[in-house]
Image (tube, rainbow, N blue to C red):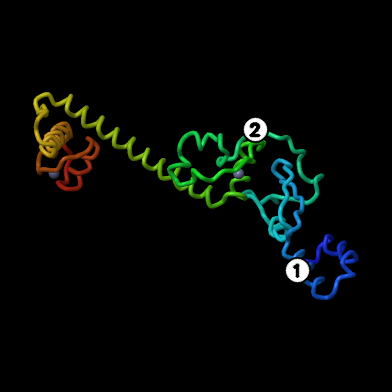
Amino acid sequence: MAEPTVVERDLRPQVSGLGGLEKEVLFQHIRTGQNPVTIYAMADGEKIEIPEHLLASAMQKKDAEGNWMFTQKAEEAPTYVGGTVKCFLHADSPERASGVLDKIGLAGKRCPKSNLASEHSKRIHAATRHSKEQEALQDYLDREEKQEDRDAQRKQLDATLDLARGVSGSAAVEADAAPAEQATTVLNAIEDQLPSCGQCDFIAKSNAGLSAHVRGAHGDVPE
Ligand SMILES: [Zn+2]
Ligand SMILES: [Zn+2]
């Protein structure tokens, strides 16, 4: 339980005429924190109204660098310069326009915040106001990035296979062969281009690899 607040102490004389029960109910109501208090974001000086019961925990919040995120004293925070950066849940946000919010089931979530001062303020706003939604978005973006990496690797492999087809004219792949046969032909074509051991059926990935193999497996150096 937080310390009794200024608000509660100030109200005490005004309600002194009430009977004991009503007075207790009113004080409970005040203690449960329905009175907004003003705090300022240390990042950009934005003025934020929060329910009183959240004040204590807001004052304990630190950002990733370990700096206090909020203060109750305006003079401790930078002067707020309103910006034009929209919350990612804003109706006209770039994220909404990209369709990503629909994909992660946040099509119906709206936030009117449109005057964030910077991308940094936007991240802080998202982390404090929409942490679950922000997490869902980040998960999606992470998955998408991994998929793009896999696609890029796939393209690289395809390019290597194309190159192998081109290099080995004699092992031309028949276009109407079954995919499995095509793959085998292509792999054979690639192996034809790779240095192979003259003493066993080892195929190396490079000349250096072959030298290492010959030294290790057959105890001499290839000519
Ligand atoms: Zn928002
Ligand atoms: Zn060998």
Q: In the image, is residue 8 above or below residue 205?
A: below
- Say which label, 2 or 1, has the lower sequence index: 1
Residue drawn where x is 89% and y is 69% of the image = 16
Q: Quadrant of residue 56?
A: bottom right
> Considering depth in this image, is 44 or 195 the residue closer to the camera?
44
Q: In the image, is residue 207 above or below residue 109?
A: above
Q: Amino acid at mark 2?
A: Thr
Q: Quadrant of residue 146?
A: top left
In this rendering, position of residue 192 left or right of residue 143: left
Label 2's element?
A: loop
Q: In the image, is residue 135 above or below residue 16?
A: above
> Percent x, y for residue 157?
26, 35
> Considering depth in this image, is 27 or 205 the residue closer to the camera?
27
Label 1's element?
A: helix
> Percent x, y for residue 66?
66, 51
Q: Residues within 10 Å of mark 1 (few under 14, many from 20)?
A: few
Residue drawn where x is 68% and y is 33% of the image = 83
> Considering depth in this image, is 13 or 203 the residue closer to the camera?
13
The circle on residue 28 is 1
In this rendering, position of residue 60 left or right of residue 129: right
Quadrant of the image containing the N terminus = bottom right
Q: Amino acid at mark 1?
A: Gln
In this rendering, position of residue 208 left or right of residue 223: right
Count the labels in the image: 2
In this rendering, position of residue 144 left or right of residue 208: right
The circle on residue 84 is 2
User: Whereabouts is ligand 2, in terms of quadrant?
Assistant: top left
Q: Quadrant of residue 124?
A: top right
Residue drawn where x is 74% and y is 42% of the image = 45
> Percent x, y for residue 196?
14, 37
